[in-house]
Image (cartoon, coloured by chain):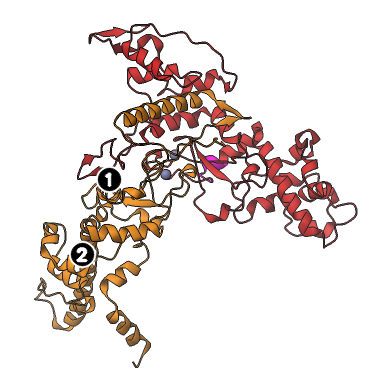
Amino acid sequence: MSGGEEFTDESDFSEYWIDWFLGTKGNEYFCDVDYEYITDRFNLTGLNNEVYNIQLAIDLITDNCKLSDIEDERGNDNEDEGEEDDDDEQEKRNQEYRDEMEYSARILYGLIHARYIITTRGLQKMYEKYKNGDFGYCPRVYCQLQPLLPVSMNDQLGHSPVKLYCANCEDLYNPKSTRHSYLDGAFFGTSFPAMFFQTFPQLVPVHNTEVCCPKIYGFELHEYSKLNRWRELQKRKLITKLKANGIPVDNCNGGYASKKKESY
Amino acid sequence: MSAWKSGQQNVTEDVTSEEYESWISNYCTLFGHDYFVEVSQDFIEDDFNLTGLSSGISHYREALDLILDFEPEPPISTADLPLIEHSAEELYGLIHARFILTKEGLNAMAVKYENGHFGSCSRVNCDSMLLLPIGRYDQAGVETVRLFCPCCCDIYFPSSSRYLNIDGAYFGTTFPGLFINTFKEVERQAAARHQKESFQLKIFGFKLSELSKSGPRMKWLRQFPTTPEEIEEYNKCEYSVATPQDVGKLKGSKEKRAEEKDKDKKDVVDEDVKSTDSKVKADDDDVTMKSPDGSIMSVK
Ligand SMILES: [Zn+2]
Ligand SMILES: [Zn+2]
């Protein structure tokens, strides 16, 4: 350990790729995908169409090779060029290639992640993160800090940024921080929250049904309270239907909290 | 700096010489105070606007002098200053809540609103609709400020912790209602966003059944009447939630729609509000619905 620079290099080397990835700012929504899952080629079926140089990307993620060791061996188009620039040129190409491969490895991890989190092991890991509030809490006051879950509107890469699902109001929200608002939704997938609550039905909240109505000096604005009454009617109709099917709805998971006097 | 014109004569020469800032403009620029507008000096100096505020606030007179940049008659002792500062902040907040309900205050808040100073709704379907500050209680010290979205008509926590110690009473329960009632354009912006299809959980593209525990149970929360039947139901909810019998009648559609005119004193019936919400407005004469024998009939 002679110089400061070498020291930094060395600590880079000692870190696992996944740990580095999970520790990067903006990647807080991701869980730790099992090594065994990544190395089972069956789980990666079809991803070679989405990920550039998938074998090298797998080697990077699984620490079978280091980014800094990668050299661009794709050949040189400008072979006629003078020899003196060769080393610099090669280094420049290597660096570009490394950047490309780093990107490729991130995409691969994200796409594997989307598949992994709907497996039993993956759901368990996301459960821990959910309990920990890693995805944030619903900003809606009447949801009483219901933890959120990541979800996508599309399973295809590059189609939709990640959104957050609240199981109390059953609605979607944009992430609070901009560092999450550009995360690709495809890294979480469209099926994840539904799978999650099917797997952990005890986590389905007892829905708080309080609603808001704009007021002027204590008087509700008529059009708004009328709409609220119609919505209340829709809720009652659903309750009638659920009860007719023998489904409990009073103060139970998936049911409704007994109504408190609404304050606003 | 218009707000200190009458305070000027009471301010000693050496204070004015430097870049002197009035208490109000200073207060409104403090960290986390960006929801506040500057209340005009004239408003505060009109005793009528302050009716009832003196009883709830300690050192009321001194606090008021501080807000207006008047030199207090016996100068405030340094020991009392923190206490009076605190009173001044509460007093300013409560005056602010009244001021933003005036024409001048509403206009000042509208400028902040249009500049997005209160943030935008993070609900995906609200498509960055701008928010308005609200207090769920008009008494100080009960709850901190919340934000009202005119699109989903719901209330949210401010996204930044800097507003965690701003009292909701400094904005009050009436402000957003009066704001949307005053600036009809806001309701139009909201209505334009109501067309979006609501989200529903899916597994591999299949929607979950309503009967499943994790199935949709809150669809009604964001729903708008769209089909003729729903609009008919909606009109039945004029003064109370329609009963299942009413709904049953609707389905039979034998009867003409009953004229229900039992007045409910609780609602403000506002013709202007009624006419603007185009999405929800039902034209009674144009509703068609299916009769039991399947033929389309017109309901008068
Ligand atoms: Zn919610
Ligand atoms: Zn909204």
Residue found farthest to the bottom: A2
Q: Is residue A24 left or right of residue B21?
A: left
**Which image quarter: residue B225?**
top left
Q: Residue at x 50, y 26 (%)?
A: A225
- Which chain letter matches label 2? A
Within 10 Å of disc 1 (Cα), the crowding (few <14, some 14-19, many 20+) is many
Q: CA distance from mark 1 to mark 2?
A: 22 Å
Q: Residue at x 35, y 29 (%)?
A: A238
Q: Earlier in the sequence, mark 1 or mark 2?
A: 2
Whole-percent x, y for residue A177 in the image: 42, 55
- Image colour for chain A is orange
Q: Amino acid at mark 1?
A: Met
Q: Which residue is mark 2?
A: A104
- Image colour for chain B is red
Q: Is residue B101 magenta?
A: no
Q: Is residue A59 left or right of residue B86?
A: left
Visible residue check, residue B93 = yes
Q: Which residue is mark 1?
A: A153
Residue A26, relative to residue A160: is it above or below? below
Q: Secondary structure at mark 1?
A: loop
Q: Is residue A111 left or right of residue A145?
A: left
Point out the quarter of the image occupied by ligand 1.
top left
Whole-percent x, y for residue A116 in the image: 22, 59
Q: Is residue A160 left or right of residue A4?
A: left
Q: Secondary structure at mark 2?
A: helix
Whole-percent x, y for residue A112 in the image: 20, 60
Answer yes or no: disc 1 within 8 Å of ligand 1: no
Which-is-in-front pick, marks 1 and 2? 1
Q: Amino acid at mark 2?
A: Ser
Mark 1–mark 2 CB contact (< 8 Å):
no
Visible residue check, residue B39 = no
